Amino acid sequence: MNLFLLQDNIQYFKEDDPIAGTILLVGLGAILLIIFVSSLIKNGINPGKGISKSSGSTSRLSPFALHRISKTYGFNRDQAKVLEYVFRNGGVADPERVAANPQVLDKHFKRAFKQIENSAGSDEEAQQRQAMLFAVRNIMEVYHNTSPETPSSQQISANMAAVLTVNQESYPVKVISSKGESVLVDCPRNALGTLIRFPKGTRVNLAFFTKTSKGFSFDSQVLGISDTSFGPALQLSHAGRAKSMTQRRFRRRQAALSCDYYLVRIEDLKNKKPPKMVVDPRRMSGSLTDVSIGGCAIKTQSSVPAGSRLKIEFDYSHSTLPIAVLGQVLRINRSGITNTIMHIKFLKVPRKSMNAINALVFEYGND
């Protein structure tokens, strides 16, 4: 509000009472001052000390945008504070845009991860704060991997490569069109190039990949065959939303890390609860081929039966101590003549090891 304008138009107030006019001006000035100071404090600026350490930037960070993001991901109060710290530490002015872009989001989370390492008063404090940081990041990762962004059968792009599965037989096809009352795809042909004609009503599955390499599929049935400018086309019924073909919720990192593992047996003693776990001293070696916070895969020549429990240890350059976890073998696949690959689910991971695995998976430990 322009105070000079108020002074020029003071005749609108009582001219015979200049004290009242002065009081009014002083009151308006005080209100403006309070609004200004409140705005500075809300944006992380202390009028007496300058920019606070947690702000990282003088850019405005809308509390309403933070609230919307927190509500979208289902954050509790502590998790919302962690996200606010990440954004303020990175000087983020448009948090909703950053939250929607995993690459940009990781840049700010990595910066916050490094800041925690450098500013924490103790290792215990650092581990606790990093655990909260990764909890928030993984919630956002799961949301993006499982959010209902699956396309409908009417949104499949023309000329998109797909795989048609009929009675456990798969045929590579191309989508001609998904508009109208049916999905049109190339008619499959046999090895001799002869058109394969499926009876009307035959149940089929069509799988395809989007430009972002996400796989989807939907169940359908054959409606018939029609002639198009591209040749004979198989007509498939629409099926609403497609199903995601991606089952993994957490980010997985390909790796080539040496590891050791030991069999763990359970001693069910009558008077001890929970049962005692005993680690076999005999060491077996392998190579960690991929890892996530939920499990890993180990390539080895000394495999163990599915269902076995293992203590697994491996080194990661960013971690001062070997990462140690308790896991269980889910399944085993052959790899070449002598090797096998064990797919392992983690059962128990200490907080420090979990932070190190998260840093490895998200590549926050890399300089």
Image (cartoon, helix red, strand yellow):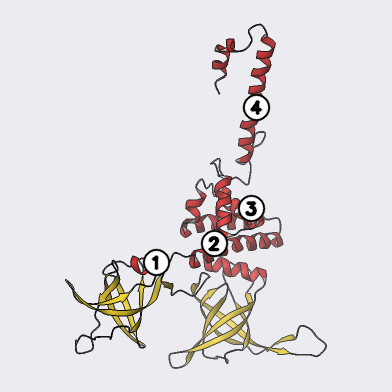
The type of residue carrying mark 4 is: Ile
Front residue of this view, candidates 12 and 30: 12
Residue 320 rendering spot, x and y as whole percentages: 63, 68
Left/right placement of residue 185 relative to residue 40 reads left
Depicted 161 relative to depicted 168: above or below: above
- Please give the count of numbered marks on the rendered protein: 4
Nearer-the-camera pick, 346 or 100: 100
- Which residue ends up furthest to the right in the rendered image? 271
Q: Secondary structure at mark 3?
A: helix
Q: Residues within 10 Å of mark 3 (few under 14, many from 20)?
A: some
Q: Quadrant of residue 155?
A: bottom left
Is 339 in front, or is 136? 136
Judging by the rendered image, the residue that carries numbered circle 4 is 31
Q: Residue at x 64, y 63 (%)?
A: 131
Q: What residue is drawn where x is 57% and y is 50%? A: 66
Dot 1 or dot 3: first in sequence order is 3
Q: Position of residue 38 (x, y in %)?
A: 64, 35
Between marks 2 and 4 in the image, the one whose residue lies nearer the viewer: 4
CB-based contact (under 8 Å), mark 2 and mark 4:
no
Callout 4–callout 3 Cβ contact below 8 Å? no
Q: Quadrant of residue 177?
A: bottom left
- Helix or strand or loop: what does disc 4 sit on? helix
